[in-house]
Amino acid sequence: MDKQQLATLISEGKAVLGMELGSTRIKAVLIGEDHAPIAMGAHDWENRLEDGIWTYHLEDVWTGIQDAYASLVQDVKVQYGVALESLAGIGVSAMMHGYLAFDKNDEQLAQFRTWRNTMTERAAAELTELFGFNIPQRWSIAHLDQAILNGEEHVAQIAHLTTLAGYIHWQLTGQKVLGVGEASGMFPIDDATCDFNEQMIAKFDQRIAPKGFGWTLKDILPSVLNAGDDAGILTEKGAKLLDPTGTLKSGALVCPPEGDAGTGMVATNSVAVRTGNVSAGTSVFAMIVLEKALSKVYPEIDMVTTPTGKPVAMVHCNNCTSDINAWAGMLHGFAAAAGQEVDMGKVFVTLFNAAMEGDKDCDGVINYNYFSGEPVTGLDEGRPMMVRMPDSKLTFANFARSLVYGAIVSLKLGMDILAGEQVKIDSLLGHGGFFKTPGVGQKLMAAALGTPVSVMETAGEGGPWGMALLAAYRVNRKEGETLEAYLSEKVFGDNKGTKAEPDAADAEGFNAYTKLFVAGLDAERAATKSMR
C-alpha cells in the first residue's frame, strides 16, 4: 500500500496496535491490513533495585506507555499527515512472570516483583516437589508461596494476583484475564483443558489451608483465554490511559494479553510442533514446541505453552546482552576521551564484527555476564566479571568474541538438556537485539546450539509486532481458523528468513569455551559471596 492508502486506513480506524513492555524499552507498533509495520513508537526505561528487590513503579509503567504511544502518534502524523483517532484492535504484552498483588479495592499490596528476582528458592523447590512439575523462581506462584513462607502480612488481603501484561490489560478493558501462554508463567497449565491445572490448584489450597486466608487460589488468579478469544474492548478509561489527550476513541477489540515468550513465538511463526525460537535481548530464552512430554522434571527447563496452549519447553536465562551494553558504553567513553566521537550503533557493530575475527575458543578469555542470578547455573546472585588464563591473548577480537559467547553460553547449557532428550527441531528462528548485526549473533548462536538458526527481515520488530499480529488475529479470525494457519498463510507466506548453519570449527571452539566457563563458575559463586 502507498502512503495515501495507509493514511486512509489509519483515518478509518482499521490499523491494529501492538505494545510490549520489555526490560529496557516499551515499544509500540502499528500494522496495516497486510500485517507489515507502518508506524512505531518507543520509550526507554529501567528497572530499580529497591530493598533488594528488582521492581518497576506502576506510575512509571503508565508514563512509559503514554510516551511510547505519543511517539507512535507523532510518527503517524509525520509519515501520513493524519491523526490516530481509532483502532481496529489492540494487544498488550510484557515481561512474563513476577508478582503483582491487589486487594478488594484494587490497591497494590506489595512491590511489583519482576522476573529478574531470585528470592524464592525455597518456595520454588517445595512447589516443584509438591506438583511433580518444575516451578522456576520467577513464576508468580513461587513469589506468592514465598510471601506466605515469609509471613508477609499483605497476603491475607489479596483479591487479585496478576502479571504486568495482565495488569495493563485489566486497566484498559476492565477484564481480569490472561492469554494461556502468559498464564503458563504464573501457574502450570493442563494441556487437555488449556486452563490452570485443577489438581495442582487443589494441592496448593491444601498446602495453605492452615493459614486461613479466606481465599482459594482460583479466587485470585485471572481467567485464562486462548489466542483469538474475546478479551474485551478498549474502554473510555482505557483510551484515556493510553492517550491522555483524549484523541483516541474507545471500542477497539482487545486480544488476550500475552508474555514476551508468546509474542516471540508469534513474531517468528514458531507456534507449530517442532518449531522453536530464540529471543535474545536483556534476557535470553529458547522456546521449543514439543511433540511429547519430557521424560522427567528438569529444574533448568520451564514448561509453558504457546498462545494456543501447545506444550513448550523453555530454557530461560536472566542474563544476555546487559554486559555487552555495559562494555560498549565503556568503549564509547574511551573513544570520546581520545577525541573520537563514535555513534553508539557503530560501537555495537564494530564489537560484533570483531568477534568473528577472534580465536574460536577466545583463547581462554571468559566472560561471566551475570548482572543478576542465573538459575540455569544455580546462582542466586550475579557479579559481572571477565577472567582469563595467564597466557591468553587478550586481543580486542578475543575480548569481543568472549562477550558474545558469554551472552549465550548459559542458554547452551540448558539446550544441551533438550538435545539429550532427543527433542526434534525442524526450524529455529532468532529475534531480538543480539541478532541485529547481520550474520554474527546468528552464526555464533547456530554454533552454540548445534542447529541451524534463521533470522527473518522482521526479526528486529520482535515482541510488539508479534502482539500486533495476535490482535490482528482477534480482529480478522474466521470461524475455525487456527493461529498456526493464520500466521503461515496470511502473515509469513514463504518468508523463511536467512539461515545460518552450524560451523564445525565455531562449534568446537564454543564447546571449549563452555568447558572453561563451567570450570570457573566457582569463582563467580565466590564473588557473589565475598563482594557485598
Image (spheres, grey):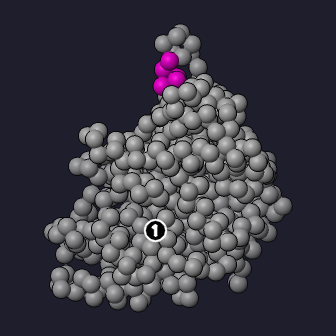
Indicate the secondary structure of the residue bearing disc 1: loop
| Residue on which the image places disc 1 | 299
Instruction: Please say if 191 is above or below 505.
Output: below
Instruction: Please say if 6 is above or below 334.
Output: below
Q: Nearer the viewer, residue 53 or 446?
A: 446
**Residue 407, percent across and down?**
55, 45
**Residue 80, percent across and down?**
68, 43
Q: Is residue 331 magenta?
A: yes
Query: On the picture, is 408 further left or further right than 139?
Result: right
Residue drawn 19% across the image and 75% down it:
156
Are there few (<14), some (14-19), or many (20+) residues within 10 Å of tag 1? some
**Residue 236, percent across and down?**
43, 64
- Please indicate, yes or no, whether residue 95 appears anywhere in the rendered image: no
Magenta: main secondary structure: helix
Range covered by the magenta-colored residues: 330-334
Residue drawn 61% across the image and 77% down it:
310
- Please indicate, yes or no, whether residue 509 appears anywhere in the rendered image: yes
Query: On the picture, is 266 further left or further right than 90?
Result: right
Check the image and name the residue furthest to the front.
391
Q: What's the amino acid at mark 1? A: Pro
Residue drawn 41% across the image and 90% down it:
199
The quadrant the C terminus occupies is top left
Residue drawn 67% across the image and 43% down it:
509
**Residue 517, percent across and down?**
52, 45
